[in-house]
Image: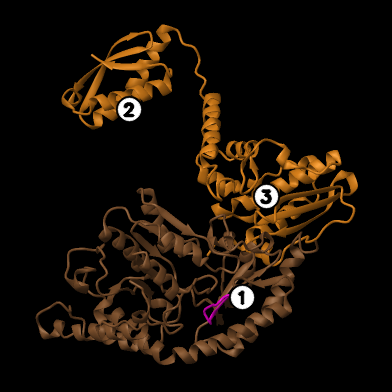
Amino acid sequence: MKQSVYVDNNATTAVAPEVTEAMLPFFYEQWGNPSSMHTFGGGVKKHIDEAREKVAALIGAEHPNEIIFTSCGSESDNMAVRGAVDAMGGHPHLITTRVEHAAVLGPCHYLEDKGFRLSTLEVDDAGNLDMEQVREKSMSGKATVASIMWANNETGVIFPVPEIGNLIKEGGGIFHTDGVQIVGKLPISVKDIPVDLLSISGHKLHAPKGIGVLYAQRGTKITPHIMGGHQERGRRAGTENVPYIVGLGKACELALQRMEHDAEHERKLRDRLEAGILASCKGARVNGGGSERLPNTTNISFEYVEGEAILLMLDDVGICASTGSACASGSLEPSHVLRAMDVPRSMLHGSIRFSLSNYNTGEDIDYVLEQIPRIIARLRELSPFAND
Amino acid sequence: MWEYTDKVTDHFKNPRNVGAVENPDGDGLAGSLACGDALRLTFKLGEEKKIAEAKFQTFGCASAIASSSALTVMLIGKTVDEADQITNADIIDYLGDLPKQKVHCSVMGREALEAAIYNYRTGKTFDKKLDGEVICHCFGATDKEIEKVARGQKLTSAEEVANACKAGGGCGQCIPEIEEIINRVIGEEKAKTEEKPKLTQLQKIKLIEETIDRQVRPILRRDGGDLELHDVDGDKVLVKFVGACVSCPVSAVTLKDVVENQLREAVSDDIVVEAV
């Protein structure tokens, strides 16, 4: 399969070679069960503890045992929402936003169907929340569980999580934030802000797929969804996925070392890509461009062309990106995030997300900038609206 | 990732007949910017009133572009009456296949063709919204349109309707109404094919006996059971279970689900079966 420029890192990232290397001994040599009494197995446990410390260090968690290893970001999100609601008992009021990942919206809608009250907060056309709305909902007088993402996967727009956390906590609620897209990209410190639960996904930060984390601040009550084992201090049963846990630990260690440098590198490339596309293509706009955003993400809409067609033409020249277009997903509706932002109809179907990583180079950006204007011009030649 | 045929990919990457025919004889538009895909089709007649030139402009995904391109190729050389016979299934056949979620792209081709032919025949611009009541507000689909697609493609679920013409695939609020249409169409189609001839009482008894022998007994015998026809009173059929059926705890279910259903299908919808 051809692939010369990979700019779809919010979908998944390449596993860092250092990570693979750190994992290998746990397949071939130290493959014991960390719960075993013998040294061969039990000796593995300290590597899990080390990984736990590395994850804690990356997100500024005070205690390593606040880190619960899961199988993926979606599991962490599900566990947070359903586990917090269950542990709270009664019928807490759920608060979320229209632009969350499906792994949060799914369990929220499930609970709504079961009779829970769900408030779904709107965003404005720049992708930002109305903080007055957050305040109002969090003070509704009822116990609340709020799940509000830190950074949006499609647009990269960052929500003011410290401020949101304060409001939710003032109202006496539990606050979960989906940190899948921000962790490893920008420095965060959960000990300084009121976050009870935070989801992390390994494969978004150069660890492999199949490993995630739920951070649960000490004292946060959460009902486990996998029961029947003492692992993760009884909060998530099942023999630990040792190689992947070790790999995630390594990826977090690397992220902590490189994050500042990488974020600057990605921001420069992203800004150049964005400016280049806007200069070379008429009728293009950056969705959420005026907001505080992740340094690696840009979501650009092209008027009068359809996203899947753009994506396939990019694919043809070896460029991997994503689209919020309906046609690409098999659903008939375009991205729920862009619809929530009231992106104009002429632009709604033609959105492309480019998301970079530290592995991208200036040449990658040059190549994309060379290809995009040609592709957009070609598709506009075909479009019945382009000349209107 | 869609599995497109080579022909779809070819027509997407190298679309034929792009643009608009100058001074067209027929000009039709289907879809809209808001819906996420749209197709403008224009054609011009030449010698012997055959389509000499057909061109398209499409806003949409790869399969929408490929369906449009294919349609123009299929049109050239045909008379308008011949062209009017081209269905969305013909477009799919021409392309080899389309993923089921992309069938609506071929339907858009058919719709644009209808609009262009309407324009050719009447000189007026086709306005599909006039035809029926809008049921799906997300995609502007009317009841008549949904009914036509459901009947033409023999669709049985709202999901299939959405794949075929998008209706109901947006917010989903109209799905109950779409299901109502589907159920009505299925009922009407079934009634058409299944009108049973009137039987005399003697013919009826004979047919009941035959059906029991051919279709019911083999099923019961598989489980060591059997039954005998005891009597027929109008539409009431009295049967007597024998063998394993006598002591079977679910024989009452068998009576309705197997015996009665088979007899209703073969003989008359009014048959009621009872055990003696």
Q: Nearer the viewer, mark 2 or mark 1?
A: 1
Q: CA distance from mark 2 to mark 3?
A: 42 Å
Circle 2 residue: B257
Q: Nearer the viewer, mark 2 or mark 3?
A: 3
Q: Amino acid at mark 3?
A: Met
- Pick the quarter of the image with the C terminus of chain A: bottom right
x, y percent for residue A360: 54, 86
Residue A295 lies in the magenta-colored region:
yes
**Colour brown maps to chain:** A
Name the subunit of mark 3: B
x, y percent for residue A268: 58, 88
Q: CA distance from mark 2 to mark 1?
A: 65 Å
Circle 1 residue: A290
Q: Could you tell me which secondary element the residue under label 3 belongs to?
A: helix
Circle 3 residue: B108
Q: Nearer the viewer, mark 3 or mark 1?
A: 1
Name the subunit of mark 2: B
Q: CA distance from mark 3 to mark 1?
A: 37 Å
Q: Amino acid at mark 1?
A: Gly
Image colour assigned to chain B: orange
